[in-house]
Image: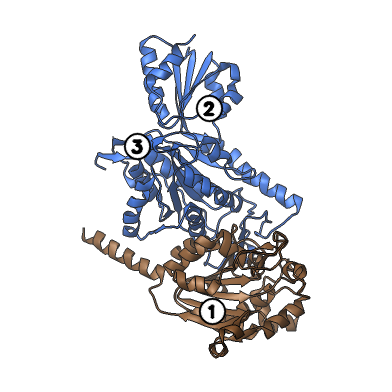
Chain colours: A brown, B blue
């Protein structure tokens, strides 16, 4: 019991609730959850001030376990629900947890428009390159040539580069980490949480149960090892040739700029309109 | 308040503001766009929030998000957008989040006739989202009624923690009438019940004292979970049949047991009436005139104008139709609410008058049906 009380993880988990969790043993989503908790714990934020909004899929189940104000919404729509909440509760820390299929396919429109508005929501995109919960169908980030249960002859789509897409759409903080580099991931998430505006952290994960099995990539440990051996920091990548960078995951902060946050800009509109109204 | 010439969509805006609506999310679509345009100007003046979203799916999602934040919220759209909203309307029904969805109906299906009226979304308003769910739908027939029913839509939504659909149509939305809005202090305004227990005792989906548990806004100390999955009393996903049955019983019960409060209509059925005309929305205007013309010709005709269409006012329909030989149901569709009237009074009694080509049903068309033997 002492250990339970002392472990900071438990301060943020709904201890009497639905454990064990729904994720497969060895899943990377738990590592992202741990990284997020460490980041929040370092910031010392009150749990009452945090809202966590998710969509549908394996990632969508994270809010159930977290002792915040949590909302598990419809497929792809987490950012749209979060936008309404953030508008009326601008002081709340609103975090959207989404998967690659969730936020880039069915929710792609909401992703680019939330980025365009630069609304103060922290988006954590857990990228496992597949639809895991439905059984391994190809997603918008499945690499070309990979197998999936709906791509038995190999995937002919090209994958979305999440970070580049977010930057082009107007996000003002964009970073990528992997679940293997868990400590680095929580530092990236911490920076994203502190950022004023729309921030995106692509957390590269894996799905050994579907993607790993069908593509013969081994166990969860093998897939973690692959991340270790095939990812480089942004600084290291700068010194590499395009050939050397082929197939590598680049980690780090890719974009950080200042631009008026949406709810702050809207507050000015309200101020203006109310002042004009008083005059009249 | 001084009398003024007002458009139906404008009356909807006035009603929403009077009811305490402080959040609007929407996407431009004819014939509802005036509602968004006016609210984009008016909401900031009262410290409210307006946002134009990327589509109608996002609009209703943002509305639900804002309502979870404790603010009365609505969206406005027309047929194509209403179709897109269906999944999240189901979410609001499942998670019991108050919100108002205005659908200024135009002729469908598909893009149909964007600037012409219809009443083709009666069944979609009831059954548009998948799965069995409770819902409340109101339909105004005049500018003044649009104001009053918009206020009522918010009141019912807050009182019963349910999405409420205001089913307008292009005629009612775009026509202008002289109205004198009631002074704000004369309006009865319902706000959602605040959580009254300490957070550790709070269950967002169960309260022993009421079938409508209080909904605590996010960020005020009540940390709980909301999901579109079937859930237990605390909001956590469940597959337990007893917990699922409990939700179904309570969710439907809270509407069914309060039918008297939710259902409103206007009846003008003199004793000895042989024919009953049942109408709603813009068609009720033609129906009212047809009844007047028929009475001038000494026909014994009664008129039932429905304001609440879901839950269907079956008690009133049955009671008033009992003395009548025939029941006439004019609608700008191919027979949707007529199905309910037929269910209640029997098919043999019902004479449908339908038009779904973008034209309004005229009083003469309804009069002709009254005069039929």
Indicate left or right for B362 with A112 as reference.
left
Using the image as rendered, state which of residue A159 and residue B310 is in the foreground.
A159
Mark 2 element type: loop
CA neighbours of label 2 inside 10 A, class few (<14), some (14 to 19), many (20+): many
| Callouts 1 and 2 on one subunit | no
Question: What whole-number distance in Å separates the C-alpha atoms at marks 2 and 3?
Answer: 25 Å
Mark 2 or mark 3: which comes first in sequence? Answer: 3
Q: State which quarter of the image contains the N terminus of chain A.
A: bottom right
Between tags 2 and 3, which lies in front? 2
Using the image as rendered, state which of residue B22 and residue A227 is in the foreground.
A227
Mark 1 element type: strand
Q: Mark 3 points at which residue?
A: B143
Using the image as rendered, state which of residue A38 and residue B52 is in the foreground.
B52
Indicate left or right for B231 with A174 as reference.
right
Mark 3 element type: helix
Question: What whole-number distance in Å separates the C-alpha atoms at marks 1 and 2?
Answer: 56 Å
Instruction: Tell which residue pokes out farthest to the front in this image.
Output: A243
Question: What whole-number distance in Å separates the C-alpha atoms at marks 3 and 1?
Answer: 52 Å
Name the residue rendered at 52%, 67% in the picture.
B219
Using the image as rendered, state which of residue A132 and residue B43 is in the foreground.
A132
Quarter assignment of residue B1:
top left
Name the residue rendered at 64%, 44% in the picture.
B131
Q: State which quarter of the image contains the C terminus of chain A.
A: bottom left
Q: Mark 1 points at which residue?
A: A175
Q: Mark 2 points at which residue?
A: B335
Between tags 3 and 1, which lies in front? 1
Name the residue rendered at 52%, 54% in the picture.
B193
Indicate left or right for A222 with B53 as reference.
right
| Callouts 3 and 1 on one subunit | no
* Residue A250 position in % (x across, y down): 58, 82
Q: Is residue B277 visible?
A: yes
């Amino acid at each position: 019991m002492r250990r339970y009380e002392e472990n900071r993880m438990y301060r943020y988990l709904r201890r009497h609730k639905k454990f064990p969790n729904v994720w497969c043993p060895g899943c990377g989503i738990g590592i992202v959850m741990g990284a997020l908790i460490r980041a929040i714990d370092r910031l010392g934020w009150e749990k009452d001030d945090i809202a966590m909004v998710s969509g549908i899929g394996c990632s969508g189940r994270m809010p159930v376990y977290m002792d915040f104000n949590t909302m598990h919404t419809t497929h792809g729509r987490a950012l749209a629900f979060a936008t309404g909440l953030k508008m009326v509760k601008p002081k709340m820390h609103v975090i959207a947890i989404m998967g690659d299929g969730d936020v880039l396919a069915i929710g792609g429109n909401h992703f680019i428009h939330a980025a365009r508005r630069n609304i103060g929501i922290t988006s954590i995109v857990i990228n496992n390159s597949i639809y895991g919960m439905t059984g391994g169908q190809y997603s918008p980030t499945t690499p070309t040539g990979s197998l999936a249960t709906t791509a038995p002859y190999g995937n002919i789509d090209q994958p979305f580069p999440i970070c580049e897409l977010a930057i082009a759409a107007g996000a003002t903080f964009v970073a990528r980490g992997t679940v293997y580099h868990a400590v680095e991931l929580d530092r990236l998430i911490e920076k994203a949480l502190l950022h004023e505006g729309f921030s995106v952290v692509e957390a590269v994960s894996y799905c050994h149960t579907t993607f790993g099995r069908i593509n013969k990539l081994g166990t969860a440990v093998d897939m973690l090892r692959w991340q270790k051996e095939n990812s480089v920091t942004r600084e290291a990548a700068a010194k590499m040739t395009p050939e050397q960078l082929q197939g590598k995951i680049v980690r780090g902060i890719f974009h950080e700029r200042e631009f008026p946050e949406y709810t702050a800009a809207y507050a000015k509109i309200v101020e203006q309109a109310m002042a004009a109204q008083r005059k009249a | 308040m001084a009398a003024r010439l007002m458009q139906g969509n404008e009356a909807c805006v006035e009603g929403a503001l009077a009811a305490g609506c402080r959040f609007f999310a929407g996407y431009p679509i004819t014939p509802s766009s005036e509602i968004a345009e006016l609210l984009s100007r008016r909401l900031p003046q009262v410290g409210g929030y307006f946002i134009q979203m990327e589509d109608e799916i996002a609009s209703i999602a943002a509305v639900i998000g804002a309502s979870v934040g404790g603010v009365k919220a609505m969206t406005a759209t027309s047929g194509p957008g209403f179709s897109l909203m269906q999944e999240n309307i189901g979410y609001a029904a499942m998670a019991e989040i108050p919100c108002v969805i205005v659908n200024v109906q135009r002729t469908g299906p598909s893009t149909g006739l964007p600037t012409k009226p219809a009443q083709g979304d009666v069944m979609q308003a009831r059954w548009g989202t998948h799965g069995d769910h409770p819902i409340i739908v109101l339909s105004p027939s005049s500018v003044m009624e649009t104001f009053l029913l918009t206020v009522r839509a918010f009141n019912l939504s807050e009182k019963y923690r349910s999405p409420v659909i205001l089913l307008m149509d292009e005629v009612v939305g775009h026509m202008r009438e002289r109205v004198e809005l009631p002074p704000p202090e004369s309006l009865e305004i319902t706000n959602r019940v605040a959580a009254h227990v300490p957070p550790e005792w709070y269950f967002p989906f169960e309260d022993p004292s009421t079938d409508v548990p209080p909904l605590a806004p996010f960020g005020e100390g009540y940390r709980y979970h909301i999901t579109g999955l079937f859930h237990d009393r605390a909001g956590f996903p469940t597959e337990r049949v007893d917990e699922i049955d409990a939700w179904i019983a309570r969710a439907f019960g809270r509407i069914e047991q309060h039918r008297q409060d939710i259902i409103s209509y206007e009846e003008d059925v003199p004793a000895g009436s042989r024919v009953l005309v049942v109408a709603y929305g813009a068609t009720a205007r033609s129906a009212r005139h047809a009844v007047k013309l028929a009475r001038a010709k000494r026909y014994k005709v009664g008129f039932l104008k429905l304001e609440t269409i879901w839950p269907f006012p079956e008690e009133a329909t049955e009671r008033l139709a009992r003395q009548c030989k025939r029941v006439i149901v004019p609608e700008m569709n191919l027979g949707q609410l007529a199905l309910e009237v037929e269910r209640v009074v029997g098919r043999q009694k019902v004479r449908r008058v339908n038009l779904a080509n973008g034209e309004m049903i005229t009083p003469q068309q309804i009069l002709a049906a009254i005069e039929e033997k």
